[in-house]
Amino acid sequence: MVSFRLPTTLALLAASVIAQDYGGNGPLGPDENGKYEISAEGIRGLFIPYGASISNLFVNDTNGIERDIVLGFDNATHYSEDPYHPHFGGVPGRYANRIKNSSFMIDGTEYHVLPNENNNNDTLHGGPHGWDYRNFTVVAHTTSSITFSLVDPDGEQGFPGEVVSYITYTMTPNEWHLKMVALSTTKKTPIMLSSHTYWNLDAFQNDDTALALNHTLYLPYSGQRIGADGILIPNGTILPNDLYSVNDFWSAPKQIGANFSSPDLLGNCGTNCTGYDTCYLVNRAQNGPYDWRTEGPVASLFSNFTGIQVDIFTDQDAFQVYSCGGQNGSIPLKSTQGLTDGSRPRVVEQYGCIVMEVEDWIDAINQPEWQRDKKNIFGPGDDPYVLEARYSFSVN
């Protein structure tokens, strides 16, 4: 069989076509901090080419005060310089989350990718030079939309085949939309993307707490989760989120910190870890055919302090929640966040944020019995990988 490789000129043409859905190209450029702004009524965001990352997201709270509710750095140059590299707002790829033993099989061939976590026992977010370590190209930019593109070469980080990707962010009134498209042009390869955005709906400006444990989370379709070992590698099991258990966010909305005093939460995010770093399944099919745009949000997050609520709609079948247990106060807040009276350190403290990742079942490439190949493996001639999501904001 003759494989098909998408020429660079055709790839850029495809990017233009994708961008036209959101208003086409425009002459806008980056600001003095290297950030590109897009906006609509009630919402504006700043983005950078490094990792195709969201750097700032401004929405008004219940009192009309503008709050910057995602984590990041003030200047685009700092993203590549920060030694901790917390994956702030970027697109992890070409395969998000963890890959067991940094290896996988495709059609009987075993591939080994570069390890970068747990003493090099697994690969996290695509490896030590994954997509959110790289500068994407801005191929379209209007006042309300921006499209980034990246060509990932054959063999990069050990992954087979070239992948051409387009990441489009769009603002409409009170909503942030994202669309991720990736095409495998030469060989079958794993592809799973996400948005690794860190949230604090209080913008760290709550006088009572710098943490996000007061945020209320609701996962109405997530009565199950993927079982994992002590280093968060899926072990092949699907676990029930029993009613009223620490992982029950489906029966009713619940504060993130509601069960932090429960002994059942110890080890819930890995060995000796208290909190969440958990892949919840999104079970909507039982209701019959559905349109993800109208079926209802897969997740809702709410802050009583600001009154800001975000409802997340997506076509993906899993949802990772991380309660920022790994933060240790070493990362500074942006100038747009935090208190200015000196009453507490201007840093991200442990549990000071929530990461919510729309994605497919994690490490499904090493769990063939899950039968997720059509969602995880893509080759020349296949339909492209597509991820879509909408973040709708309101105030209570």
Image (cartoon, rainbow, N blue to C red):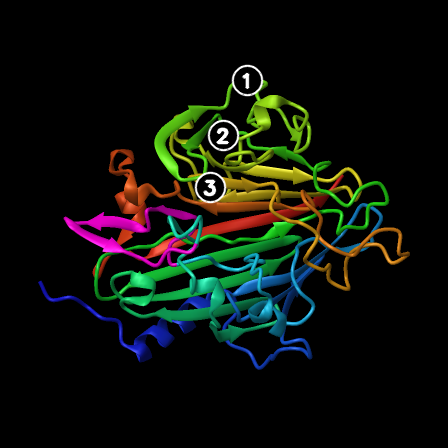
Q: CA distance from mark 3 to mark 1?
A: 25 Å
Quadrant hosting residue 245: top right
Answer few, some or many: residues within 10 Å of disc 2's Cα (few below 14, many 20 plus, some between 14 and 19).
Answer: many
Earlier in the chain: of badge 3 and badge 2, it is 2
Please give the residue where the numbered disc 3 appears in the rendered image: 292
Earlier in the chain: of badge 2 and badge 1, it is 2
31 lies above or below 324: below
Q: CA distance from mark 2 to mark 1?
A: 11 Å
Please give the residue where the numbered disc 1 appears in the rendered image: 243
Verify whether residue 376 appears in magenta: no
Where residue 221 appears, as percent x and y from the top left, is 50, 30
Instruction: Identify the amino acid type marked 3.
Output: Trp
Task: Say whether marks 3 and 2 touch (CB < 8 Å).
Answer: no
Q: Which residues fall within the magenta stretch?
A: 94-116
Where residue 364 appears, as percent x and y from the top left, is 33, 41
Q: Secondary structure at mark 1?
A: loop
Where residue 274 appears, as percent x and y from the top left, is 60, 33
99 lies above or below 76: above
Quadrant hosting residue 184: bottom left
Where residue 42 appears, as percent x and y from the top left, is 72, 56
Outermost residue to the right: 341
Q: CA distance from mark 3 to mark 2?
A: 15 Å
Outermost residue to the top: 243
Residue in the image at 55% along x and 27% along y: 247
